Image (tube, helix red, strand yellow):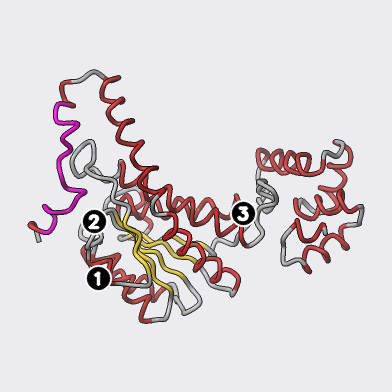
């Protein structure tokens, strides 16, 4: 097992940073920045695979399915972060995108010894979420071999879910599981084995692409505006009204009136103003257009 780990790209020393411990703060940061630039270049070449993964997610959302991210350590926390941002940003129910981490919620903050080494715990967490053939499960592991993640992926596949892998090495055990494996090989880390750095950045960028693309394609965005946000606090109420203003160029009085009559629903308010209809008609048009503002306006 140690030989397998030693051969992983993510476990290799980085020749460019051998003397990093003798540099100034600014010089260290320049090296980190130079390496970070390589991440976007790597991901650009993976766009066809990431798009394919997003298409699976879009189909799941359109047919009542859910998206699960499964990871351990940094990978698990990144999945939970992406999942937790979907409800306020896109007005989705918390169940629609979920993040699972080895060791449970406590592991978001504190390491849980041995949790990531259990295939059974991964499978158990999938069973507890009642994963079905309508769902998509994305396993995330920089090494591509984390037992907890592989156990979850295998169990999800047995239940008929679409299983996707995301790792930062090639030729890993993850590659033999599921419909698609995205291998974002960003090279050795600035500090050897610290996969919270480039590997984690690549994972975060890819998850952003997956959920953002999927949300756009199910009607959560009009133009480039997040018209399905949940205005649950003062900042988001301001943002919601600002979005209505940008979409309609209406007066402050019109925006306030429409926002109130639409009960804070941004899409409804936009259609009310641009189509000069009441809230009920705006909702009817929106429902007929499956939630797509552009289609509802036509």
Horizontal and vertical percent for residue 137? 42, 68
Horizontal and vertical percent for residue 203? 37, 50
* Sequence-earlier tag: 1 or 2: 1
165 with respect to 280 (left or right): left
Q: Nearer the viewer, residue 211 or 110?
A: 211
The residue at the point 33 percent across, 30 percent down is: 33
In the picture, residue 37 is in which quadrant? top left
Residue under label 1, please give it: 119
Horizontal and vertical percent for residue 236? 66, 42
161 with respect to 218 (left or right): left
In the image, residue 176 above or below residue 46: below
The residue at the point 20 percent across, 20 percent down is: 23
How many discs mark residues in the rendered view? 3
Alpha-carbon span between mark 1 and mark 3: 33 Å
Quarter that holds the C terminus: bottom right
Q: Which residues are magenta?
A: 4-19
83 with respect to 236 (left or right): left
Q: Nearer the viewer, mark 1 or mark 2?
A: 2
Q: Residues within 10 Å of mark 1 (few under 14, many from 20)?
A: some
Is 279 a magenta residue? no
* Sequence-earlier tag: 2 or 3: 3
Horizontal and vertical percent for residue 246? 75, 39
In the image, residue 116 above or below residue 19: below
Q: Which mark is residue 143?
A: 2
| Label 3: element kind | helix
Q: Which mark is residue 90?
A: 3
* Sequence-earlier tag: 1 or 3: 3
In the picture, residue 296 is in which quadrant? bottom right
Alpha-carbon span between mark 2 and mark 3: 31 Å
| Label 2: element kind | loop
């Amino acid at each position: 097992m140690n030989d397998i780990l030693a051969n992983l790209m993510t476990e290799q020393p980085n020749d460019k940073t051998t003397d990093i411990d003798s540099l100034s703060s600014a010089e260290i940061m320049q090296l980190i920045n130079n390496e970070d630039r390589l991440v976007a270049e790597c991901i650009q070449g993976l766009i066809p695979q990431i798009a394919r993964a997003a298409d699976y997610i879009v189909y799941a959302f359109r047919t009542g399915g859910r998206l699960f991210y499964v990871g351990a350590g940094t990978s698990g926390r990144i999945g939970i972060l992406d999942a937790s941002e979907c409800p306020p940003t896109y007005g989705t129910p918390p169940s629609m995108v979920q993040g699972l981490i080895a060791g449970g919620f406590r592991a978001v903050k504190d390491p849980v010894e041995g949790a990531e080494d259990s295939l059974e715990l991964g499978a158990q967490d999938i069973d507890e979420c009642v994963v079905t053939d309508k769902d998509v499960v994305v396993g995330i592991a920089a090494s591509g071999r984390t037992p907890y993640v592989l156990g979850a992926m295998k169990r999800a596949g047995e239940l008929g879910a679409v299983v996707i892998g995301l790792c930062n090495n090639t030729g890993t055990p993850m590659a033999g599981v599921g419909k698609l494996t995205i291998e974002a090989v960003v090279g050795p880390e600035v500090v050897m084995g610290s996969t919270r750095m480039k590997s984690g950045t690549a994972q975060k960028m890819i998850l952003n692409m997956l959920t953002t693309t999927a949300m756009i394609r199910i009607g959560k965005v009009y133009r480039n505006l997040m018209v399905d946000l949940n205005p649950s606090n003062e900042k988001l109420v301001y943002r919601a009204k600002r979005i209505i203003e940008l979409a309609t160029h209406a007066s402050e009085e019109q925006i306030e009136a429409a926002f109130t009559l639409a009960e804070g629903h941004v899409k409804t308010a936009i259609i009310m103003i641009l189509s000069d209809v009441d809230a009920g008609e705006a909702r009817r048009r929106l429902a007929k257009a499956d939630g797509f503002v552009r289609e509802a306006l036509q």
